[in-house]
Amino acid sequence: MATDQAAAIGAGAPQSDASRAAFPRFEQTFPTLTDAEIDRMRRFGDVHHHKDRELLFESGKVGPGMFVILSGHVAITQRDGMGHVTPVIEQGPGQFLAEIGQLSGRNALVDGTAEGDGETLLIPPASLRALLVAEADLGERIMRALILRRVALIQAGVGGPVLIGSPTLGGVVRLQGFLARNGVPHHVLDPASDTDATDLVARYSPSPSDLPLVVAPDGTVLRNPSEVDLAYAMGMIGGPIRDKLYDVAVVGGGPAGLATAVYAASEGLSVAVLDARHFGGQAGASARIENYLGFPTGISGQALAGRAYNQAQKFGADLMIPVEARSLDCSKSDGAFGLTTECGHFLKAKSIVVASGARYRRPTIENLDRFEGRGIWYWASPIEGRLCAQQEVILVGGGNSAGQAAVFLSGHASKVRMMIRSGGLADSMSRYLIDRIMATPNIELMIHTEIVGLEGPDDGGLERVRWRNRKSGLEAAGDIRNVFLFVGADPATAWLADCGVTLDRTGFVLTGAQCGRPVSALETSVPGVFAVGDVRAGSVKRVGGAIGEGAQVVAALHGFLGDKPA
């Protein structure tokens, strides 16, 4: 495993043939800066002298920023928390040491050790963001390299935690999905085939409910952790939310919330973004979005959201994930709105943007909760795709998200039974997706059909599904181990209870003229609280619409705050 990872990243000196072969975009991933370019960067950092074998940054600990090597060499290695050290790459004069996490001062994912005495220019995170904006051409090269390095780490499984358990175990799939959708490198070791994993399981003797075990980079072992516990162990959340009054707090990191963050932060507003699980929201789970302007060949929801997430970091927005909003205090007793989070933090902001979107709807099916994460899924990513390879699966739903998922799953499963309660797709799905579904031979559209039963052992996964035709009443069953539910969503607005924000009868946020008072189109019944995206009553429920509202609300924020865009 270690050899494969090293090859994937490009072990050895940066000019080696092996490194270049491992990176089709090597020159972009590890560019060498000219003396003139380094001189332009000096005003953003300070020169540091280092000794041979000195550790510049350490996996699992907060990175100090970006190092530009002025003299000497630095060896980059991976240390996985289980005692394994893997060479990654060696970098020398003119090259810089960082990846995308250093834009926001996150934990380092690899170790950097000086090889011989030397000098570096250390640029801390805030100054790095200033550099990217002030030096546009140079900033573009650096930003591209930071992104490509994170992509390489993810693809090779280098850095981040080690998950110990069967790849088909529900807890492994749950944590893999959480880490993947937050862009965190990780890898899985199966105790059935890996001796290190077997030894670790024997040492900790976990009960079945303790699996998977998770080994953090610092060696800490977690037993079947929650996403929040894993995030704390990985430094994704860090300590208590800083004592700061933000211009705007955005609740929700989907397309609308990220668009708000990018445009507001780029115009000089201080921005905090909270999301309960991962950036991208439900749109982040879309296998391919083909009707979004500017991407004629389509783009995955994860890729689109990842670009927006990186943009928001570039402009200095504070992204707090996974941090869930529990309540909003609109009394403004101290001149600011107060957000209380599930993890007990309290955040203050002059204005609030509600972009919390919607939560996956859970249909009324007996035993549904027992099989969630063990055969019942609410999204379809490559992780779930691997689980159902060459199997027959059921997909329930008739919207665009369901159509995208059906087409994606058809490339993995032997057959996709697409079940809808209505008589067709025309009222709920884009024409291009309907045509593609009809042209895909292993997708069977089953109209007027609903699931009526789920079967499987109490301590195991889903094994059999029963369904019924709503018109004829006839029932059938099949040995199905994976069911994908795309049956819509309910607004995530429980945290707005008792704060004065008016909702419609289904829980969506009313804005503009709907509020019964003369306010801007995206403002709610509470002055200074705005709503964008799927959570807003009357929104078009499309990615493009959500992004447009996220951009549009920034003008209203400036108006409320009484300033002007920079």
Image (cartoon, rainbow, N blue to C red):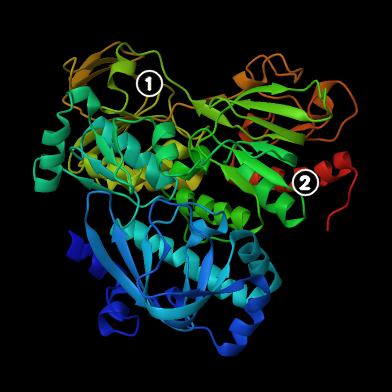
Name which residue lies at 64% across and 18% down. 507
Residue 391, percent across and down?
18, 38
Against 298, is 402 above or below?
A: above
Q: In this rendering, does residue 512 appear at all?
A: yes
Q: Is residue 42 above or below residue 184?
A: below
Which residue position is annotated with label 2? 554
- Give how far across and how far down residue 324 sits, in percent: 55, 29
Along the line of sight, the residue nearer the viewer: 439 or 320: 320
Q: Which residue is mark 1?
A: 448
Q: Quadrant of residue 519?
A: top right
* Helix, strand or loop under label 2: helix
Q: Residue at x 66, y 23 (%)?
A: 508
Q: Is residue 491 left or right of residue 426?
A: right
Q: Name the residue type under label 1.
A: His
Q: What amino acid is labelled 2 in the image?
A: Val
Whole-number angstrom distance, CA of label 2 to CA of label 1: 44 Å
Marks 2 and 1, the one that precedes in the sequence: 1
Tag 2 and tag 1, C-beta contact below 8 Å: no
